[in-house]
Image: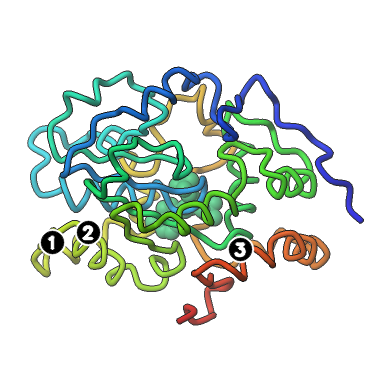
Amino acid sequence: MPAVLTMQPQKQYLFKHKGFYFQSELATAEYIDSLEDFEIRDSDVFLVTFPKSGTVWTQNILCLIYHEGHRKGTESTSSMDRVPWLEYNIHIRDYNSRPSPRLFATHLPYYLVPKGLRSRRAKIIYVSRNPKDVLVSYYHFSRIAAKLETAGDFGDFMENFLAGEVLASSWIDHVEGWFSHKDDFNILFLTYEEMKKDLRSSVLKICNFLGKRLTEEELQDVVDKATFNKMRMDPRANYENVPSDILEKGKGHFLRKGTVGDWKNTMTVAQSERFDSVLKERMQKLPIKYCWDINEDLPS
Ligand code: A3P
Protein backbone atom coordinates (compact mmCIF):
# COMPACT_ATOMS: atom_id res chain seq x y z
CA MET A 1 0.00 0.00 0.00
CA PRO A 2 1.42 3.43 -0.85
CA ALA A 3 1.79 5.80 2.05
CA VAL A 4 -1.21 8.09 2.29
CA LEU A 5 -0.81 11.82 2.72
CA THR A 6 2.89 12.04 3.32
CA MET A 7 2.95 15.77 2.65
CA GLN A 8 0.58 18.26 4.27
CA PRO A 9 -0.42 21.40 2.40
CA GLN A 10 1.51 24.38 3.62
CA LYS A 11 -1.03 25.97 5.86
CA GLN A 12 0.39 29.43 5.47
CA TYR A 13 -0.80 29.34 1.86
CA LEU A 14 -4.17 27.73 2.36
CA PHE A 15 -7.03 28.00 4.81
CA LYS A 16 -9.98 25.72 5.16
CA HIS A 17 -13.40 27.23 5.46
CA LYS A 18 -16.62 25.22 5.51
CA GLY A 19 -14.76 22.16 4.31
CA PHE A 20 -13.03 23.84 1.38
CA TYR A 21 -9.44 25.03 0.90
CA PHE A 22 -8.92 28.67 -0.14
CA GLN A 23 -5.79 30.64 -0.84
CA SER A 24 -4.86 32.53 2.34
CA GLU A 25 -3.55 35.80 1.03
CA LEU A 26 -6.30 36.28 -1.51
CA ALA A 27 -9.48 35.79 0.52
CA THR A 28 -10.81 35.69 4.07
CA ALA A 29 -13.48 33.55 5.68
CA GLU A 30 -15.59 36.70 6.22
CA TYR A 31 -15.41 37.60 2.56
CA ILE A 32 -16.36 34.05 1.51
CA ASP A 33 -19.33 34.19 3.89
CA SER A 34 -20.40 37.54 2.48
CA LEU A 35 -20.69 35.99 -0.98
CA GLU A 36 -23.77 34.08 0.12
CA ASP A 37 -25.73 37.34 -0.16
CA PHE A 38 -23.89 38.64 -3.21
CA GLU A 39 -26.60 40.17 -5.36
CA ILE A 40 -27.18 38.24 -8.56
CA ARG A 41 -28.43 39.76 -11.81
CA ASP A 42 -30.27 37.78 -14.48
CA SER A 43 -27.55 38.68 -16.98
CA ASP A 44 -24.65 37.41 -14.80
CA VAL A 45 -22.53 34.55 -16.13
CA PHE A 46 -20.46 32.38 -13.81
CA LEU A 47 -17.73 30.09 -15.02
CA VAL A 48 -17.21 27.35 -12.44
CA THR A 49 -14.33 24.90 -12.43
CA PHE A 50 -12.08 22.81 -10.26
CA PRO A 51 -8.52 24.15 -10.79
CA LYS A 52 -6.69 23.04 -13.94
CA SER A 53 -9.85 22.08 -15.79
CA GLY A 54 -9.81 24.76 -18.48
CA THR A 55 -10.71 27.91 -16.56
CA VAL A 56 -8.39 30.34 -18.33
CA TRP A 57 -9.37 28.86 -21.66
CA THR A 58 -13.08 29.37 -21.02
CA GLN A 59 -12.44 32.80 -19.48
CA ASN A 60 -10.84 33.75 -22.78
CA ILE A 61 -13.72 32.31 -24.79
CA LEU A 62 -16.19 34.35 -22.74
CA CYS A 63 -14.08 37.49 -23.25
CA LEU A 64 -14.00 36.87 -26.97
CA ILE A 65 -17.74 36.25 -27.19
CA TYR A 66 -18.69 39.30 -25.17
CA HIS A 67 -15.96 41.82 -25.84
CA GLU A 68 -13.77 41.17 -28.81
CA GLY A 69 -15.78 43.13 -31.35
CA HIS A 70 -16.14 46.14 -29.10
CA ARG A 71 -13.18 46.50 -26.81
CA LYS A 72 -13.43 50.28 -27.27
CA GLY A 73 -10.05 51.41 -26.08
CA THR A 74 -9.70 48.61 -23.58
CA GLU A 75 -7.95 46.28 -26.00
CA SER A 76 -5.23 45.41 -23.55
CA THR A 77 -7.58 44.42 -20.71
CA SER A 78 -6.78 40.89 -19.62
CA SER A 79 -9.28 38.08 -19.29
CA MET A 80 -8.67 38.09 -15.55
CA ASP A 81 -10.18 41.61 -15.48
CA ARG A 82 -12.89 40.79 -17.97
CA VAL A 83 -13.89 37.65 -16.07
CA PRO A 84 -12.62 38.28 -12.54
CA TRP A 85 -12.47 35.73 -9.77
CA LEU A 86 -15.45 35.93 -7.47
CA GLU A 87 -13.78 34.62 -4.32
CA TYR A 88 -10.37 36.16 -5.09
CA ASN A 89 -10.98 39.82 -5.76
CA ILE A 90 -7.32 40.28 -6.65
CA HIS A 91 -7.61 43.77 -8.13
CA ILE A 92 -10.06 44.95 -5.44
CA ARG A 93 -12.84 45.91 -7.82
CA ASP A 94 -16.36 46.84 -6.79
CA TYR A 95 -18.23 43.90 -8.28
CA ASN A 96 -21.61 45.39 -7.38
CA SER A 97 -21.09 48.39 -9.61
CA ARG A 98 -19.79 46.48 -12.62
CA PRO A 99 -21.88 47.04 -15.72
CA SER A 100 -23.99 44.15 -17.02
CA PRO A 101 -23.44 41.59 -18.24
CA ARG A 102 -21.03 40.67 -15.48
CA LEU A 103 -18.81 37.66 -16.05
CA PHE A 104 -17.16 35.86 -13.13
CA ALA A 105 -14.91 32.86 -12.65
CA THR A 106 -14.95 30.77 -9.51
CA HIS A 107 -13.71 27.50 -8.04
CA LEU A 108 -16.42 27.52 -5.36
CA PRO A 109 -18.24 24.29 -4.55
CA TYR A 110 -22.00 24.34 -5.19
CA TYR A 111 -22.81 24.93 -1.55
CA LEU A 112 -20.79 28.14 -1.19
CA VAL A 113 -21.97 30.11 -4.22
CA PRO A 114 -24.29 33.14 -3.83
CA LYS A 115 -27.71 31.89 -2.87
CA GLY A 116 -29.30 34.03 -5.60
CA LEU A 117 -27.91 31.55 -8.12
CA ARG A 118 -30.21 28.86 -6.79
CA SER A 119 -33.25 30.67 -8.08
CA ARG A 120 -31.88 29.71 -11.51
CA ARG A 121 -31.34 33.34 -12.32
CA ALA A 122 -28.05 33.99 -14.07
CA LYS A 123 -26.13 31.37 -16.00
CA ILE A 124 -23.44 28.96 -14.93
CA ILE A 125 -20.95 27.19 -17.18
CA TYR A 126 -19.28 24.27 -15.42
CA VAL A 127 -16.18 22.91 -17.13
CA SER A 128 -14.61 19.68 -15.91
CA ARG A 129 -11.69 17.59 -17.13
CA ASN A 130 -10.53 14.03 -16.71
CA PRO A 131 -8.96 13.97 -13.27
CA LYS A 132 -5.65 12.39 -14.28
CA ASP A 133 -4.90 15.31 -16.57
CA VAL A 134 -6.14 17.67 -13.86
CA LEU A 135 -3.73 16.07 -11.39
CA VAL A 136 -0.70 16.31 -13.69
CA SER A 137 -1.54 19.87 -14.71
CA TYR A 138 -2.02 20.75 -11.04
CA TYR A 139 1.33 19.22 -10.12
CA HIS A 140 3.15 21.36 -12.69
CA PHE A 141 1.12 24.42 -11.77
CA SER A 142 2.09 24.01 -8.11
CA ARG A 143 5.69 24.43 -9.14
CA ILE A 144 5.10 27.83 -10.75
CA ALA A 145 2.48 29.12 -8.33
CA ALA A 146 4.37 31.13 -5.74
CA LYS A 147 1.52 30.91 -3.28
CA LEU A 148 1.03 27.17 -3.36
CA GLU A 149 2.99 24.41 -1.74
CA THR A 150 6.03 23.55 -3.81
CA ALA A 151 5.15 20.17 -5.17
CA GLY A 152 8.15 17.96 -4.63
CA ASP A 153 7.54 14.35 -5.42
CA PHE A 154 4.68 13.61 -7.83
CA GLY A 155 3.58 10.58 -5.79
CA ASP A 156 3.19 12.72 -2.66
CA PHE A 157 1.30 15.35 -4.59
CA MET A 158 -1.04 12.67 -5.95
CA GLU A 159 -1.85 11.48 -2.44
CA ASN A 160 -2.66 15.03 -1.37
CA PHE A 161 -4.82 15.46 -4.45
CA LEU A 162 -6.70 12.22 -3.78
CA ALA A 163 -7.21 13.21 -0.16
CA GLY A 164 -8.50 16.66 -1.14
CA GLU A 165 -5.57 18.29 0.64
CA VAL A 166 -4.97 20.88 -2.09
CA LEU A 167 -6.39 24.27 -3.02
CA ALA A 168 -10.11 23.74 -3.83
CA SER A 169 -10.05 20.43 -1.93
CA SER A 170 -11.39 17.24 -3.49
CA TRP A 171 -11.86 16.97 -7.25
CA ILE A 172 -14.54 14.29 -6.93
CA ASP A 173 -16.48 16.22 -4.27
CA HIS A 174 -16.45 19.27 -6.51
CA VAL A 175 -17.64 17.52 -9.66
CA GLU A 176 -20.10 15.23 -7.90
CA GLY A 177 -21.51 18.17 -5.92
CA TRP A 178 -22.17 20.30 -8.97
CA PHE A 179 -23.65 17.45 -11.00
CA SER A 180 -25.91 16.25 -8.24
CA HIS A 181 -27.27 19.77 -7.62
CA LYS A 182 -27.62 20.70 -11.26
CA ASP A 183 -31.39 21.13 -11.02
CA ASP A 184 -30.91 23.99 -8.56
CA PHE A 185 -29.04 26.02 -11.15
CA ASN A 186 -29.26 27.23 -14.74
CA ILE A 187 -26.16 25.37 -15.78
CA LEU A 188 -24.32 24.16 -18.86
CA PHE A 189 -21.83 21.33 -18.40
CA LEU A 190 -18.85 21.12 -20.71
CA THR A 191 -15.69 19.08 -20.65
CA TYR A 192 -12.17 20.16 -21.43
CA GLU A 193 -11.92 17.17 -23.73
CA GLU A 194 -14.90 18.13 -25.87
CA MET A 195 -13.49 21.65 -26.13
CA LYS A 196 -10.18 20.22 -27.22
CA LYS A 197 -11.66 17.85 -29.76
CA ASP A 198 -14.22 20.21 -31.23
CA LEU A 199 -13.69 23.79 -30.17
CA ARG A 200 -16.13 25.19 -32.70
CA SER A 201 -19.03 23.08 -31.44
CA SER A 202 -18.11 23.95 -27.85
CA VAL A 203 -18.08 27.68 -28.58
CA LEU A 204 -21.43 27.29 -30.34
CA LYS A 205 -22.84 25.43 -27.32
CA ILE A 206 -21.68 28.28 -25.09
CA CYS A 207 -23.19 30.89 -27.42
CA ASN A 208 -26.51 29.06 -27.57
CA PHE A 209 -26.63 28.74 -23.81
CA LEU A 210 -25.86 32.43 -23.39
CA GLY A 211 -28.28 33.48 -26.11
CA LYS A 212 -25.48 35.05 -28.11
CA ARG A 213 -25.72 35.05 -31.88
CA LEU A 214 -22.41 35.43 -33.63
CA THR A 215 -21.94 35.72 -37.36
CA GLU A 216 -19.98 32.90 -38.99
CA GLU A 217 -17.01 35.25 -39.20
CA GLU A 218 -17.21 36.22 -35.51
CA LEU A 219 -17.55 32.59 -34.51
CA GLN A 220 -14.51 31.62 -36.53
CA ASP A 221 -12.57 34.49 -34.95
CA VAL A 222 -13.44 33.31 -31.42
CA VAL A 223 -12.41 29.75 -32.26
CA ASP A 224 -9.18 30.91 -33.84
CA LYS A 225 -8.20 33.15 -30.90
CA ALA A 226 -9.07 30.45 -28.37
CA THR A 227 -6.73 27.81 -29.77
CA PHE A 228 -3.83 26.79 -27.58
CA ASN A 229 -1.19 28.26 -29.88
CA LYS A 230 -2.94 31.61 -30.27
CA MET A 231 -3.60 31.89 -26.54
CA ARG A 232 0.00 31.06 -25.73
CA MET A 233 0.99 34.20 -27.64
CA ASP A 234 -1.71 36.45 -26.22
CA PRO A 235 -0.66 37.95 -22.86
CA ARG A 236 -4.21 39.16 -22.23
CA ALA A 237 -5.38 35.58 -22.33
CA ASN A 238 -2.56 33.41 -21.02
CA TYR A 239 -2.00 34.80 -17.49
CA GLU A 240 1.52 35.95 -18.40
CA ASN A 241 0.62 39.33 -16.88
CA VAL A 242 -0.15 37.86 -13.49
CA PRO A 243 2.24 39.42 -10.92
CA SER A 244 5.36 37.38 -10.20
CA ASP A 245 4.47 37.07 -6.53
CA ILE A 246 1.59 34.87 -7.74
CA LEU A 247 3.17 33.06 -10.71
CA GLU A 248 6.92 32.55 -10.95
CA LYS A 249 7.30 32.89 -14.69
CA GLY A 250 10.83 31.63 -15.05
CA LYS A 251 9.65 28.23 -13.79
CA GLY A 252 7.15 27.47 -16.53
CA HIS A 253 4.07 28.61 -18.41
CA PHE A 254 0.47 28.60 -17.33
CA LEU A 255 -0.42 27.26 -20.77
CA ARG A 256 1.75 24.19 -20.57
CA LYS A 257 0.72 21.30 -22.89
CA GLY A 258 -2.96 21.87 -23.45
CA THR A 259 -3.88 18.36 -24.50
CA VAL A 260 -5.76 15.23 -23.46
CA GLY A 261 -3.84 12.26 -22.05
CA ASP A 262 -0.62 13.95 -20.97
CA TRP A 263 -1.05 12.13 -17.63
CA LYS A 264 0.46 9.07 -19.31
CA ASN A 265 3.78 10.89 -19.53
CA THR A 266 3.92 11.42 -15.78
CA MET A 267 1.94 8.73 -13.97
CA THR A 268 3.38 5.26 -13.61
CA VAL A 269 1.13 2.25 -14.13
CA ALA A 270 1.11 1.70 -10.36
CA GLN A 271 0.15 5.33 -9.73
CA SER A 272 -2.61 5.16 -12.30
CA GLU A 273 -3.98 1.99 -10.69
CA ARG A 274 -3.80 3.52 -7.25
CA PHE A 275 -5.64 6.60 -8.57
CA ASP A 276 -8.35 4.36 -10.10
CA SER A 277 -8.72 2.38 -6.92
CA VAL A 278 -9.53 5.54 -4.96
CA LEU A 279 -11.82 7.25 -7.45
CA LYS A 280 -13.31 4.53 -9.61
CA GLU A 281 -16.41 3.72 -7.59
CA ARG A 282 -17.55 7.32 -7.24
CA MET A 283 -16.61 8.15 -10.82
CA GLN A 284 -18.74 5.30 -12.12
CA LYS A 285 -21.74 6.94 -10.49
CA LEU A 286 -21.11 10.32 -12.12
CA PRO A 287 -23.53 11.15 -14.94
CA ILE A 288 -20.51 12.02 -17.07
CA LYS A 289 -17.78 9.93 -18.63
CA TYR A 290 -14.40 11.40 -19.52
CA CYS A 291 -12.09 10.93 -22.45
CA TRP A 292 -8.60 9.89 -21.35
CA ASP A 293 -6.57 10.17 -24.53
CA ILE A 294 -6.45 12.60 -27.43
CA ASN A 295 -6.88 9.66 -29.86
CA GLU A 296 -9.96 8.32 -28.10
CA ASP A 297 -13.47 9.27 -29.21
CA LEU A 298 -15.51 11.31 -26.79
CA PRO A 299 -17.78 9.06 -24.72
CA SER A 300 -21.37 9.29 -25.92
P1 A3P B 1 -1.98 21.69 -18.96
O1 A3P B 1 -1.22 22.03 -17.72
O2 A3P B 1 -2.35 20.24 -19.04
O3 A3P B 1 -1.31 22.17 -20.20
P2 A3P B 1 -6.94 26.20 -15.60
O4 A3P B 1 -7.06 27.41 -16.44
O5 A3P B 1 -8.26 25.69 -15.12
O6 A3P B 1 -5.96 26.37 -14.51
O7 A3P B 1 -6.41 25.01 -16.56
C1 A3P B 1 -5.12 25.08 -17.08
C2 A3P B 1 -4.98 24.01 -18.12
O8 A3P B 1 -5.74 24.39 -19.29
C3 A3P B 1 -3.53 23.85 -18.57
O9 A3P B 1 -3.38 22.46 -18.90
C4 A3P B 1 -3.51 24.73 -19.82
O10 A3P B 1 -2.47 24.46 -20.71
C5 A3P B 1 -4.87 24.38 -20.41
N1 A3P B 1 -5.31 25.35 -21.42
C6 A3P B 1 -5.41 26.67 -21.32
N2 A3P B 1 -5.78 27.22 -22.49
C7 A3P B 1 -5.92 26.19 -23.37
C8 A3P B 1 -6.28 26.10 -24.76
N3 A3P B 1 -6.55 27.18 -25.49
N4 A3P B 1 -6.33 24.87 -25.31
C9 A3P B 1 -6.05 23.77 -24.60
N5 A3P B 1 -5.70 23.79 -23.28
C10 A3P B 1 -5.64 24.99 -22.68
Distance from mark 2 CB to nearest ligand 1 atom below 8 Å: no
Mark 3 surroundings within 10 Å by alpha-carbon count, few (fewer than 14), some (14 through 19), many (20 or more)? some
Residue at 65% in and 19% down? 12
Q: Which residue is mark 1?
A: 218
The tag earlier along the polypeptide, 3 or 1, is 1
- Position in image of residue 32 (x %, y %): 44, 25
Mark 2 surroundings within 10 Å by alpha-carbon count, few (fewer than 14), some (14 through 19), many (20 or more)? many
Residue 224 visible? The answer is yes
Mark number, residue 167: none
Query: In the rendered view, would you say 165 is above or below 32?
Result: below
Measured in 3D between alpha carbons, the distance from the residue under mark 1 to the one under mark 2, in whole angstroms, is: 6 Å
Q: Which secondary structure, mark 3?
A: helix
Q: Nearer the viewer, residue 19 or 198?
A: 19
Distance from mark 3 CB to nearest ligand 1 atom below 8 Å: yes
Distance from mark 1 CB to nearest ligand 1 atom below 8 Å: no
Query: In the rendered view, would you say 267 is above or below 32?
Result: below
Quadrant of the frame with the N terminus = bottom right
Residue at 28% in and 72% down? 201
Residue at 43% in and 63% down? 191
Mark number, residue 262: 3
- Position in image of residue 112 (x %, y %): 44, 36
Q: Which secondary structure, mark 2?
A: helix
**Amino acid bearing label 2:** Val
Q: Looking at the image, do the residues carrying marks 1 and 2 touch, with CB atoms under 8 Å apart?
A: yes
Asked where in the image residue 200 lies, by quadrant, the reply is: bottom left
The colour scheme applied to this rendered structure is rainbow
Asked where in the image residue 222 lies, by quadrant, the reply is: bottom left
- Position in image of residue 228 (x %, y %): 40, 58
Q: Which residue is mark 2?
A: 222
